[in-house]
Image (spheres, rainbow, N blue to C red):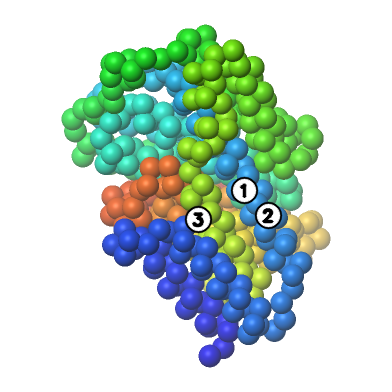
């Protein structure tokens, strides 16, 4: 059998095992690691020629995301262990599901634009653990967090990996992407929120606090507040660090983690009980490493498809469609299955940024100029399309790991709302683009 087809078959089988994690009782992280290793082995043994540098390059790019995820999850765990999230949860008094749905959805949407969708989803899901006791109620709200985080990240130049890529390469500018994709991104959230509001009834049950359980706490409120603001400040500092130094975001998050580590060591050095329970070394043992390994496996498997030329072939097939809006809508749906980063990278490689001479020779190329409709719609579709399946975005993978959400459960309960919002926002973008902006 041809290696090219064999790799596709292996990927589909591996993807099915990941989707059916709970029925077959095999952890998705184990499947993802096997999938990555087998696919690279097939490519090395049967392919036209193995390039070790390509593997190292993909591993480096994947590691940047993994270390960012690991740093952000550890910071959130430090804040959580110090009861820092009480600064927010104590201010959210409502237990009404509808009200809480809108509060969490809108908060996540705007936080995602400032931080990014991955970090925001980790923070908000940690908050939900303090607000909702029932697991399945919390799963549902976490599903909405994924929708809101991806929608919020799509309209900000720093809200999603793909928008960052387009912004850095000069395909879009910060002001234009905000102005021209904010409304479609907001619609992609408001439509599912509104629809779900008519179905959602009742109250959520708050989990018992340590104090109500009778468990002693030796954490002072001052310490909790210091750790909370230091944690949030570390997360907010990441885009500032990147702007100033032009270094990748994972170094910014590791800097923030290092600062918090030093502060907690100094804070608890004189209290042995607190030190053994609240030092970062013990907190790191609670970080969900299997989710990080799952991310490693799935991204390296997709990287193998990219190296072997599968994604390039897919991009060229899409190019035959012709209509830029249809192409991007398909890319968005595909990004829920295959990571959106290589898809966007392939699209950027296929279409150069059109200059004045190219537009003069072919007026249709205006869509590919800086801030053209193609690039802006690509940012929207690649960002929000990942919400359709839980493993279609970094935010979804992080939440899946934190809450152990079942792939099939998400497919049944959340995917239809994500799809509805995706096409609603896409329709709004097309109407604005065709009849207002790019006539």
**Secondary structure at numbered mark 1:** helix
Q: CA distance from mark 2 to mark 3?
A: 15 Å
Q: Mark 3 or 1 closer to N-term?
A: 1
Bin the neighbour count of mark 2 within 10 Å (Cα to Cα): few under 14, some 14-19, many 20 and up.
few
Numbered tag placed on residue 294 in the rendering? 3
433 or 91, which is in the foreground?
91
Residue 118, placed above or below residue 219: below
For the view shown, which residue lies furthest in the bottom direction?
A: 1
Q: CA distance from mark 2 to mark 1?
A: 7 Å
Q: Residue at x 79, y 35 (%)?
A: 245
Q: Position of residue 321 (x, y in %)?
A: 54, 72
Q: Position of residue 363 (x, y in %)?
A: 69, 62
Numbered tag placed on residue 61 in the rendering? 2
Q: Position of residue 258 (x, y in %)?
A: 67, 30
> In which quarter of the view is residue 173 placed?
top right
Residue 138 visible to an observer of this rendering = yes
Residue 159 visible to an observer of this rendering = no
Residue 161, placed above or below residue 262: below
Residue 375, placed above or below residue 266: below
Q: Is label 3 or label 1 in front?
A: 3
> In which quarter of the view is residue 284 placed?
top right
314 or 376, which is in the foreground?
314
Numbered tag placed on residue 65 in the rendering? 1
For the view shown, which residue lies furthest in the front direction?
A: 272
> In which quarter of the view is residue 202 placed?
top left
Q: Position of residue 2 (x, y in %)?
A: 56, 88
Q: Residue at x 74, y 58 (%)?
A: 354
């Amino acid at each position: 059998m041809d290696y090219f087809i064999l790799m596709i078959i292996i990927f589909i089988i591996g993807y099915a095992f990941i989707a059916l994690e709970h029925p077959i009782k095999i952890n998705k992280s184990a499947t993802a690691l096997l999938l990555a290793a087998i696919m690279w082995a097939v490519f090395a043994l049967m392919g036209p020629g193995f390039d070790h540098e390509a593997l190292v390059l993909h591993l480096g790019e994947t590691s940047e995301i993994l270390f960012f995820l690991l740093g952000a999850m550890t910071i959130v765990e430090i804040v959580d262990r110090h009861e820092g999230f009480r600064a927010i949860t104590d201010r959210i008094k409502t237990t009404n599901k509808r009200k809480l749905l809108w509060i969490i959805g809108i908060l996540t949407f705007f936080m995602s634009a400032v931080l990014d969708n991955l970090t925001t989803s980790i923070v908000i899901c940690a908050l939900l653990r303090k607000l909702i006791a029932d697991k399945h109620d919390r799963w549902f709200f976490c599903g909405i967090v994924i929708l809101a985080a991806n929608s919020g990240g799509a309209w900000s130049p720093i809200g999603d990996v793909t928008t960052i890529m387009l912004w850095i390469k000069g395909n879009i500018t910060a002001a234009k992407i905000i102005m021209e994709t904010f409304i479609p991104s907001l619609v992609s959230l408001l439509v599912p929120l509104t629809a779900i509001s008519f179905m959602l009834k009742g109250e959520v049950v708050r989990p018992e606090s340590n104090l109500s359980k009778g468990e002693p706490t030796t954490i002072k409120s001052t310490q909790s507040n210091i750790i909370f603001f230091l944690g949030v400040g570390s997360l907010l500092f990441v885009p500032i660090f990147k702007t100033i130094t032009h270094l990748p975001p994972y170094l910014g998050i590791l800097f923030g983690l290092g600062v918090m580590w030093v502060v907690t060591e100094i804070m608890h050095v004189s209290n042995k009980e607190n030190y053994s329970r609240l030092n970062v070394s013990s907190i790191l043992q609670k970080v969900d490493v299997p989710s990080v390994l799952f991310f490693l496996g799935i991204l390296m498997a997709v990287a193998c498809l990219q190296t072997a030329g599968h994604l390039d072939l897919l991009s060229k097939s899409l190019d035959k469609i012709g209509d830029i809006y249809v192409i991007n809508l398909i890319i968005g749906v595909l990004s829920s299955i295959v990571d959106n980063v290589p898809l966007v990278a392939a699209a950027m490689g296929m279409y150069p940024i059109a200059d004045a001479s190219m537009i003069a020779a072919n007026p249709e190329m205006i869509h590919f100029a800086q801030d053209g409709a193609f690039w802006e719609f690509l940012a929207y579709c690649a960002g929000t399309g990942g919400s359709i399946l839980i493993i279609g975005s970094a935010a979804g993978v992080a939440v899946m790991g934190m809450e152990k959400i079942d792939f099939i459960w998400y497919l049944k309960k959340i995917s239809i709302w994500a799809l509805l919002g995706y096409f609603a926002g896409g329709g709004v973008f097309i109407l604005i683009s065709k009849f207002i902006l790019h006539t």
